[in-house]
Image (spheres, rainbow, N blue to C red):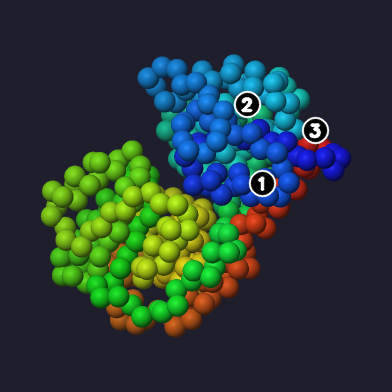
Amino acid sequence: MTDKKLKILLLGDCRSFKLESYVPELKRQDCEVILASVENGALEHHQLNRRGPIKQLHYTFAAGQLRRLAIEIGPDIIEAHDGNYGYLAALALRNSKLPINICLLGPDIIIAPHKSIFHKIKTVFALSHAAGIVADSEYLLSETRKLAPPKQSMVAPFGIEERFLELHKKDYTLSQPLKVIVPRHQEKFYNNEFILRALAPLLESDKISLTFSTTGSLATEFKAKTKRLGCPNVIFYERMERQEFLKFMSSHDVYLTSALTDSSPVSLIDAMAMGLIPVIVDTPGVKEWLSESFALTFRQNDAEDLISAIGKIFENKVPDDIRTKNLGHVRQKAIFENYVTARIEHLKRLINNR
């Protein structure tokens, strides 16, 4: 490939906060980016038409429109930002010489292929037609290989923008009650209802407060359950701009996630950078990113173990330097701008090797 500006046709959910960071950074690093999306959001994009009432079929029915858009735009490469868009790209452009790169999310590989034979066929089809993939952990790449070995791959966490490291907490004094944030979406996969039920005793005794997001398909149902349970000290926040959210996150003491499986979630990296104490469910993907020296862990769906992990914070059994260690870990391994630079080089290799 010559030194001309890289032209990327990017496919993804235009409501995604990851794309809100990724698209402008690609442009800042001298790429031409055209985003196409089945969803409708504020990020500038080409709208791919949604046809029919079944969401999963929207990606199938958009194939013809995407094929025409690719011919019109003439990109150097197609990049799909999750498994659904990887399937759409493969379906639309399987007979094209355009290379396809798929940026995989954990559920694309760890959850989706096991839902049904149809989901597995879709996943394998997408992977088989990809020139390369991006995974945020070796664990995710290993699980991908079990379905369809990628031709080329890149492994790196998404990371946090370097300029936001200055928002790291200035005061490590713990709040009373302890302020715990659970920033994962309200989806079954993230298992937030378990957290609510498991920590109800700590909420009722005014030892902690819990902060949840209002995003996700189950948000209305989750808020209703919270109200029925009568849990005090539960706070909800609306979607925010990224810098505003990071400032909001840094006002908390603890980051908590109980996702059924995980890799290296951006929210965890954000929390480490902001100076929160991570309390995370013990899963293989997260272990790769963290060790016991960086976070407190608990067993999946084990309420007593979760309360025990939180209890270590009350009992001052958390190392004094956990926050500075975490900040150093992020600074060394997960700076977003470096990730995008490496990802651009990965895309260029795919183009040169086609």
Q: Looking at the image, do the residues carrying marks 2 and 1 touch, with CB atoms under 8 Å apart?
A: no
Pick the residue in front: 184 or 319. Answer: 184
Picture layout, residue 224 above or below residue 128: below
Q: Give percent across and percent down for residue 157.
A: 59, 55
Residue under numbered circle 2: 90
Judge from the rendering whether residue 218 lies leftward or rightward of residue 200; answer left or right: right
Badge 3: few (under 14), some or many (20 or more) residues near its Cα, within 10 Å? few
Q: Looking at the image, do the residues carrying marks 3 and 2 touch, with CB atoms under 8 Å apart?
A: no
Residue found at x 85% / y 43%: 3
Judge from the rendering whether residue 25 lies leftward or rightward of residue 229; answer left or right: right
Q: Give percent across and percent down for residue 308.
A: 29, 71
Residue found at x 27% / y 50%: 193
Badge 1: few (under 14), some or many (20 or more) residues near its Cα, within 10 Å? some
Q: Quadrant of the C terminus?
A: top right
Pick the residue in front: 276 or 304. Answer: 276
What secondary structure is marked by label 1?
helix
Q: Which mark is residue 26?
A: 1
Q: Give percent across and percent down for residue 66.
A: 61, 22
What secondary structure is marked by label 3?
loop
Q: Looking at the image, do the residues carrying marks 1 and 3 touch, with CB atoms under 8 Å apart?
A: no
Instruction: Report the Cα–Cα distance between label 3 and label 2.
Output: 15 Å
